[in-house]
């Protein structure tokens, strides 16, 4: 049972990372990552703003991997996908867990978790709220 919980948890974390990368790519200037007060702080701006990102990772120089928030969140999304898959493989061999109805339910459930989590973060939590008084 713990492996099923871990599958869902890693799936949700992957959706959050995807929402972060899409927010940085499509809505940077209205996101929580855009801080006008830090406009002179090049390290902050270069890490979060995909247009100004130029920091290369010295750990993997042969890959030309950029060490910025967009690439980091995409990489974490892939890592969480792999972790979810590895946990799904470890699900015990209980006959009820391997029926076509259970697999269909998991497929639909994971799709709902992905879309719900992604939309919550992409459309609400990662955008700056304009308060009306």
Image (cartoon, rainbow, N blue to C red):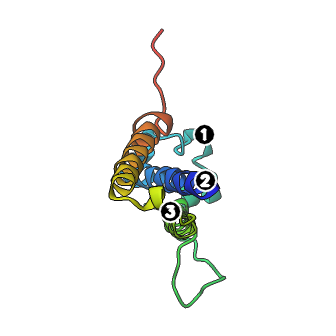
Q: As drawn, is 67 to the left or to the right of 105?
A: right
Q: As drawn, is 16 to the left or to the right of 5?
A: left
> Which mark's residue is nearer the viewer, 2 or 3?
2
Q: As drawn, is 133 to the left or to the right of 111?
A: right
Decide if residue 49 is in sight here.
no
Instruction: Tell me the SS state at disc 3.
Output: helix
Residue of label 2 = 1
What percent of the width, then of the height, locates residue 31?
47, 41
Question: Considering only vertical position in the picture, is 128 above or below 113?
Answer: above
Residue drawn at x 50%, y 57% is 14
**Neighbour tally class for label 1: few under 14, some 14-19, many 20 plus, Cα within 10 Å:** few
Identify which residue, 112 or 19, lies in the foreground: 112
Which quadrant holds residue 7?
bottom right
Give whichever of discs 2 and 3 has the lower sequence position. 2
> Which mark's residue is nearer the viewer, 3 or 1?
3
Q: What is the distance, in whole Å, between disc 2 and disc 3 at their CAs?
A: 23 Å
Which quadrant holds residue 42?
bottom right
What percent of the width, then of the height, locates residue 110?
41, 51
Residue drawn at x 64%, y 52% is 41
Which quadrant holds residue 92?
bottom right
> Which mark's residue is nearer the viewer, 2 or 1?
2
Identify which residue, 7 or 105, lies in the foreground: 105
Residue drawn at x 37%, y 49% is 105
Residue of label 1 = 37
What percent of the width, then of the height, locates residue 96?
46, 55
Instruction: Tell me the SS state at disc 1.
Output: helix
Residue of label 3 = 77
Decide if residue 5 is in sight here.
yes
Give whichever of discs 3 and 1 has the lower sequence position. 1
Q: As drawn, is 37 to the left or to the right of 53?
A: right
Residue drawn at x 40%, y 52% is 106
Q: What is the distance, in whole Å, between disc 2 and disc 1 at their CAs?
A: 47 Å
């Amino acid at each position: 049972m713990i492996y099923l919980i871990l599958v869902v948890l890693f799936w949700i974390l992957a959706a959050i990372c995807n929402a972060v990368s899409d927010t940085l790519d499509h809505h940077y200037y209205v996101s929580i990552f855009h801080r006008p007060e830090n406009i002179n702080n090049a390290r902050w701006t270069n890490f979060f703003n995909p247009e100004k990102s130029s920091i290369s990772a010295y750990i993997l120089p042969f890959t030309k991997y950029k060490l910025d928030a967009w690439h980091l969140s995409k990489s974490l999304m892939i890592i969480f996908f792999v972790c979810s898959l590895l946990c799904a493989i470890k699900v015990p061999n209980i006959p009820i867990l391997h029926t076509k109805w259970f697999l269909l339910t998991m497929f639909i459930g994971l799709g709902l978790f992905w879309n719900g989590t992604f939309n919550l973060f992409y459309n609400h939590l990662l955008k700056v709220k304009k308060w009306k008084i």
